[in-house]
Image (cartoon, helix red, strand yellow):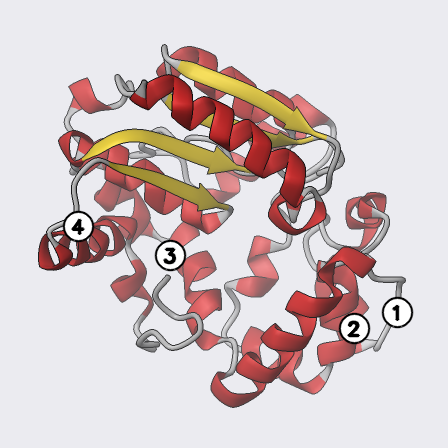
């Protein structure tokens, strides 16, 4: 994904519009002459996989979404309105941390307090997010005060890789996904999607995360029922980082689903 690893890391957040990211991926498929593709995404990758379903549905034979489910185009709901709606629905604001991640100094703050950042991101007990991540401003306080919480051992190997990579390149690229998410440009981007493409007509795999208090299974399941008539929904006994926390279960479920759609 743009902004991560060895990819380009443009500073301008509008370069991270999901329609542009989707086009990048299709261009790669064209260059490699690849056909019969299944698009899989996790978190913001799920959002980009949704854009592929919106704008390039005929290039793929199926779509898979982990933690964050399929995202229907949003053309009018602002970040403030979304927070209010989710707070009313869930009883708490599960996306309050976006405010910090989209702020101009977030990357600098994280680099100064990386141990606290990795602690809260990869916490062993995801209920911690209810108090130290979800409420607006809470994650900034947690990080800036060098607070600590036990990490999930399943994330140890990835954490070491990420720590090395982000120490070299900083967090500007990944944080741009949040700047886009709270922007007016995101709403305009949604208007590019034809109405008939809101509903995904291809097979869809939804990988829900049982212990994720931010990307709740009920939200992904409700959206899938509305927009994905060929959805297969699996719920894994894992937190947000399901690909690392339950790799065998994920691979087994994916293999079964893929075999069912290519048979």
Query: Compared with residue 95, is residue 257 higher up or lower down, i.e. above or below?
Result: above
Residue plotted at (18% across, 58% down)? 28
Q: Which residue is mark 4?
A: 26
Say which element carries label 4: helix
Q: CA distance from mark 4 to mark 3?
A: 21 Å
Evaluate whether residue 141 shows in this view.
Answer: no
Q: Residue at x 27, y 52 (%)?
A: 185
Name the residue: 10% across, 59% down. Answer: 31
Give the side of residue 50 with respect to residue 111, left or right.
left
Tell me which residue sits at (84%, 76%) in the image.
145
Residue 83, image x and y in percent? Answer: 57, 38
Q: Nearer the viewer, residue 64 or 43?
A: 64
Q: Residue tagged by mark 1?
A: 148
For the residues carrying marks 4 and 3, which lies nearer the camera in this image?
4
Q: Is residue 230 left or right of residue 224?
A: left
> Which numbered disc covers residue 116?
2
User: In the drawing, what numbered circle is on residue 193?
Assistant: none
Tell me the SS state at disc 2.
helix
Q: Mark 3 vs mark 1: which is more N-terminal?
A: 1
First in sequence, mark 4 or 3: give its number: 4
Vertically, is 68 above or below 61? Answer: below
Circles 1 and 2: CB atoms closer than 8 Å? yes
Q: Secondary structure at mark 1?
A: loop
Q: Which mark is residue 180?
A: 3
Count residues near mark 4 (Cα–Cα under 10 Å), then give few for <14, some for 14-19, many for 20+. some
């Amino acid at each position: 994904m743009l902004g991560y690893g060895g990819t380009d890391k443009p500073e301008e957040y509008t370069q991270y519009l999901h329609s542009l990211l989707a086009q990048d991926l299709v261009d790669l498929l064209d260059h490699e002459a690849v056909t019969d593709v299944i698009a899989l995404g996790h978190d913001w990758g799920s959002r980009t996989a949704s854009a592929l379903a919106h704008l390039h549905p005929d290039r793929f034979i199926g779509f898979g979404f982990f933690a964050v489910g399929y995202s229907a185009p949003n053309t009018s709901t602002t970040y403030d309105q979304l927070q209010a709606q989710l707070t009313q629905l869930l009883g708490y604001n599960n996306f309050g941390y976006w405010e910090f991640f989209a702020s101009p100094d977030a990357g600098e703050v994280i680099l100064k307090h990386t141990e606290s950042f990795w602690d809260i991101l990869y916490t062993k007990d995801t209920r911690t997010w209810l108090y130290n991540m979800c409420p607006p401003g809470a994650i900034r306080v947690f990080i800036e005060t060098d607070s600590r919480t036990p990490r999930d051992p399943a994330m140890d190997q990835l954490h070491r890789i990420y720590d090395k990579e982000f120490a070299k390149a900083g967090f500007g690229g990944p944080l741009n996904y949040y700047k886009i998410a709270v922007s007016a440009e995101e709403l305009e981007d949604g208007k590019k999607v034809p109405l008939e493409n809101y509903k995904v007509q291809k097979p869809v795999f939804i990988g829900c995360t049982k212990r994720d208090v931010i990307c709740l299974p009920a939200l992904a399941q409700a959206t899938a029922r509305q927009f994905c008539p060929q959805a297969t929904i699996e719920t894994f006994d894992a937190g947000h980082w399901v690909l690392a926390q339950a790799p065998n279960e994920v691979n087994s479920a994916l293999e079964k689903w893929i075999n069912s759609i290519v048979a």
